[in-house]
Image (cartoon, rainbow, N blue to C red):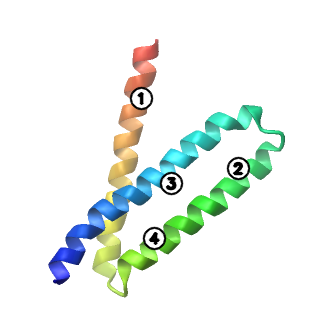
Amino acid sequence: MEFAYACLALPAGMLLGLFYFGLLWITVRSLASARAPALHLAVSFVIRGSVCMLGFYLIMQGHWERLLIALLGFVLMRKILVRRLAQRKAEER
């Protein structure tokens, strides 16, 4: 049963990464039109950070191995999104 939870930690971490970096991308793109950009950025950071910390806490359930696997998924999702966005940017040129 422990192995099954560990296997679910990777996609859960990837979902958290998609949420965090996707919302960051949306936030950065909307800063130019925001009335209070600093407040907009700060609120976004608090929301993204809080959701991710809660998500990692729930995934971990007292086992540091699950946290490590979830963090691996989080970083993996960051790499995937950076590549995709870079390809999209190159195609637009």
Q: Within 10 angstroms of label 3, few (less than 14), some, or many (20 or more) residues?
A: many
Q: For mark 1, what is the residue?
A: 86
Residue in the image at 33% along x and 81% along y? 64
x, y (%) of residue 10? 28, 63
- Report the disc number at residue 55: 4
Instruction: Identify the amino acid type marked 1.
Output: Ala
Relative height, residue 66 to residue 83 (above, below): below
The numbered dot on residue 20 is 3
x and y, in percent, of residue 75 in the image: 37, 55
Residue 81 location, quadrant: top left
Disc number lying in front (2 or 4): 4
Name which residue type carries label 4: Gly
Q: Which residue is mark 2?
A: 41
What's the distance in space between the residues labelled 2 and 1, CA to CA? 22 Å
Measured Cα–Cα span from mark 1 to mark 3: 18 Å
Check disc 3 and report its element: helix, strand or loop.
helix
Which of the two marks, 1 or 4, is nearer to us in this view? 4
Give the farthest residue toward the top.
93
Q: Kindly indicate whether the residue at mark 3 contacts the one at mark 2 (C-beta within 8 angstroms).
A: no
